[in-house]
Image: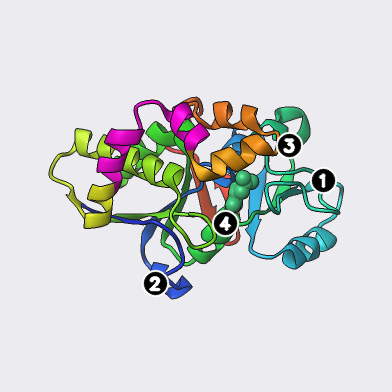
């Protein structure tokens, strides 16, 4: 098995993902939101890469079963129902609903990887569920960090490094790329205290300034959720593992 890590989606195009197994990570906060929403009973999450498309999809939906969620500059978008704090995606709000999600980096990263043969969504909260599933799947895979507007983001890389590290602990013969080795090394340095790392990261600082400090505590909660969000034909659903 070979494992690769992309620190951001900037240097790959959509077709690159054809036939690949991909894991998208956006710890702060899109993939944590997706995992939380599905865990709390959302029917599905529909990731979109523009606000216009989000509006269009919600316009064509019917029956009041749709929620528009997401953020611009970390804040709720005008005309949307909820923002991008995982704390908003509780069972009362999301159970049985289809959530159309637009975010600055995370939803776009998922959409970019849409041609993958297998496409999973990961964060610290469901890390072990993803590790276990990838091990059983036994296929080469790549981790796509959502990053920050095309640039590197520490928290996504640390989560990727921990995923690779945990895979290596189960199977030390996995072949890992240079970028995967770098992610593992960074996890050794910064991953001992996840909450501290999130608080000190650039995006973590911005979220604290904007009043979302509690989100960091939630996003640092390793293995609190045992589900595998899986993308297929435009929607992300909770995977039923046999
Ligand atoms: C993103 O997609 O860039 C993030 O989820 C931003 C955030 O809500 O903090």
- Say which of marks 1 and 3 sits in front: 1
> Which residue lies under the disc numbered 2?
16
Pointer 1 with pointer 3, Cβ within 8 A: no
Pointer 4 with pointer 1, Cβ within 8 A: no
Q: Position of residue 5 (x, y in %)?
A: 33, 55
- Residue at 63% in and 39% down: 207
Q: CA distance from mark 2 to mark 4?
A: 18 Å
The quadrant where residue 242 appears:
top left
Q: CA distance from mark 1 to mark 3?
A: 11 Å
> Which residue lies under the disc numbered 3?
94
> Which residue lies under the disc numbered 1?
81
Q: Is residue 138 visible?
A: no
Q: Is mark 4 within 8 Å of ligand 1?
A: yes
Task: Tell me the SS state at disc 1.
Answer: loop
> Which residue lies under the disc numbered 4?
105
**Residue stretch rendered in magenta on the structure:** 183-200
Q: CA distance from mark 4 to mark 1?
A: 19 Å
| 128 relative position to 66: left or right | left
């Amino acid at each position: 098995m070979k494992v690769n890590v992309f620190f951001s989606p900037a240097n790959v195009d959509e077709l690159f993902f054809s036939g690949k197994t991909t894991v998208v990570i956006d710890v702060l906060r899109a993939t944590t939101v997706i995992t939380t929403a599905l865990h709390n009973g959302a029917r599905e999450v529909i990731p979109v890469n523009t606000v216009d498309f989000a509006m269009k999809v919600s316009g064509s939906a019917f029956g009041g079963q749709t929620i528009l969620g997401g953020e611009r500059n970390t804040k709720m978008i005008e005309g949307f129902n909820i923002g991008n704090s995982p704390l908003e995606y509780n069972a009362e709000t999301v159970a049985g609903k289809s959530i159309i999600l637009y975010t600055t980096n995370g939803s776009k990263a998922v959409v970019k990887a849409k041609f993958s043969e297998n496409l999973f969504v990961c964060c610290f909260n469901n890390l072990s569920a993803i590790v276990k599933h990838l091990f059983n799947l036994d296929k080469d895979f790549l981790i796509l960090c959502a990053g920050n507007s095309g640039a590197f983001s520490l928290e996504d890389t640390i989560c990727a490094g921990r995923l690779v590290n945990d895979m290596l602990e189960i199977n030390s013969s996995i072949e890992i790329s240079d970028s995967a080795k770098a992610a593992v090394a960074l996890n050794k340095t910064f991953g001992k205290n996840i909450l501290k790392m999130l608080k000190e990261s650039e995006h973590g600082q911005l979220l604290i300034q904007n009043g979302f400090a509690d989100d960091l505590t939630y996003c640092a909660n390793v293995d609190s959720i045992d589900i595998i969000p899986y993308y297929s034909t435009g929607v992300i659903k909770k995977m039923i593992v046999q």
